[in-house]
Structure formats: structure tokens, C-alpha cells
Amino acid sequence: MILGKEIDFMGVRKPSAMISAALVVASLISLAVNSLEFGLDFTSGTSVRLSYSESVVIREVNQTLRDNGYEDAVVVQFGNDTDIRVILPVDEDVALENQAEQALEVGETIAAVLRTGTTSTIGLLGSDYVSAKVGEELAEQGGLGMLVALGIIMVYIAVRFQFKFSVGAVVALAHDLIITLGIFSIFGMEFNLNTLAAMLAIIGYSLNDTIVVSDRIRENFRRMRKGSPIEIVNTSLNQTLSRTLITSFTTLLVLFSILFIGGDATRGFAIALIIGVVVGTYSSIYIASNIIIYMKVTREDLMIPIKEGADLDGSP
């Protein structure tokens, strides 16, 4: 709906809230029933560290491993462009107490396989068995990190703006994370450390967008002498719309480049951030602002407090 030259964002705030609620509920149900398809970063497996004498092309390494029957291997770079880590699922037929010894044999085998597909000299830096307990700790620490980040953000925005704005920002961030995780759960996409890093990046991106919108809303509440809270919020959203769309568009260009060119190692990261940017752009308009309206923000909430004893009329 368009009012004059302005888009009436808040005119559809109730339908948008219902759509968001439905997506969040569907995501939570999927997470509860299907959970996430955790990658080898969060499950038990063998980690093989290799060093090349020349820069490594991850795509070629993946192809060599697939050609030799290692379709489930995950290859990532670490340290510099000549070092890689190959993660393979654990062999269920090998007893737990023999997994460490088995990991050494797997490392030698992987190194030998990769030497056949390159002229570069390959050195085996190490091969270790990674238990599922390590993955559980990573998941717990990552989840705790998200909760701490949301808590700090809420305090910051409450101090920087106003408590009602902090509630809107945190609800919007939780909305973005839950829906992103829900999509990964519904479609059975792999969730690994790269994806976890993307979740934290989504918090930063969505928060930045929400703060820009909130700052304009606060400014207009103080500057505009006429208009209801809904009208002021609408005006603020329209004023920041071009900035929001340009930022999102340019970010998506980079992310789609990573998705199509970056290979398997960065695919989960790119997909998660693409979902997060789209949902985050939506939430900064329809969730954070909607919460502010729902909590009945007023001009009095955002007026600059007058210091006690200040000269009100400018006279001595």
C-alpha cells in the first residue's frame, strides 16, 4: 500500500507479524523434530592436516578425493594457502579405543591419494581422531556466544536509544536466527563451523540495519511535531529504505559470488548469510519497528532529558 509517495509499511504490520510468527513456529517445530544436519565439525571423525609446497586449489583436492571414493570428505584451508585440513567420517566398524590408531593410517592413505593428483610436494602434518564430545562443546559454546551477544546488544540499545527499541532489536535478531536455522533444518542442509560463523555474522548485519532505522525513528520523533507514532515510523522507514536496499543488494552480490565461485568449503556460509540478509532486511522493517509500535513508544520516551537546575528560558 502506498500513501502519496510513501510506502505504508505499518499498514500491513499485522499480516507481516502473522507471517513471521508462522515461519518462526514452523522453524521451531522442524528444529525440535528434525534437529540440524550437523557436519563433521560437530560429530566424530578423522582430521588430517596436510601441507603443500604450492598454493592449494580446494576444488581440485575435492575432485581427487571423490574420484578415489572419499565423497564424504570435507576440505578446508587453515593457516595459509598451502595448508589444508581434510575431515572424514569415523569408521563405525573400528572400535572406539582403536580410532586414534586408525586415524594415523587414514592420514597416510589420504596423503598418498592426494599425491597422485598433483605435482606439488605434500607433507602430512598430523592425523587425529576427533570425538563427538568436541563437537558438542563447539555447539554449546557457539549457542552460548549467540545468547551473550543478544544480551549485550539489548543492554547497548537500551542505553543508546530506549528500552522499547532494545526489545524490538533483540526480537528481530532472534527472529532472523530462528528462521535461518529452521530453513537449514527443513531442507536438511549441513550445519558446520562455517555456518555457525555465518549465524554470528547475521547478528552483526541485522543489528546494523536495525540501528540505522531506530536512529532515524528517534530523530523523527524529536523533530516532527505532527503525526501519530505509526506515521512517524512509516516516514522513517521510507527515508532509510534506499540505504537499506542498496546495502542489502551489494551484500547479496558478494554472497552469491562466494556461493557460485567459493566451492564446497564456503557454500554453507554463503547460503546462511544470504538467508540472513534477506530475513534481516525484512525484520528491520517489519519486526523491530512493529515491536516499537506494539509497545506504544511516545515522544516523551525519546525526548532529551533536561538536566536538573538547567536554565529553561535562557535568562539569568
Image (cartoon, rainbow, N blue to C red):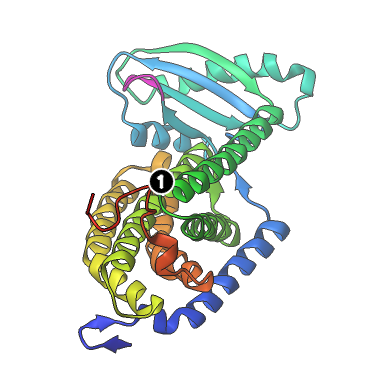
Q: Give x and y (percent) for residue 287.
A: 47, 67
Q: Is residue 276 left or right of residue 184?
A: left
Q: Give x and y (percent) for residue 278.
A: 38, 62
Determine which residue is flagged by label 1: 204
Q: Give x and y (percent) for residue 65.
A: 46, 33
Q: Residue furthest front?
A: 316
Q: Nearer the viewer, residue 56 or 297?
A: 297
Q: Nearer the viewer, residue 25 or 170?
A: 170
Quadrant of res 133: top right
Residue at 43% across, 68% down: 289
Residue at 52% across, 35% down: 73
Q: Can residue 268 be seen here?
A: no
Q: Is residue 249 left or right of residue 33?
A: left
Reply above or below: 8 against 163: below
Q: Can residue 226 be seen here?
A: yes
Reply above or below: 302 against 94: below
Classify mark 1: residues with Cα within 10 Å, few (<14), some (14-19) or many (20+): some
Count up the numbered dots.
1
Q: Would you say the magenta stretch is mainly helix, strand or loop? A: loop
Residue at 63% across, 51% down: 36
The amino acid beneath tag 1 is: Gly
In the structure shown, which secondary structural element does the residue marked by tag 1 occupy? helix
> Which range of residues does the magenta coloring cover?
78-83
Q: Give x and y (percent) for residue 19.
A: 53, 76
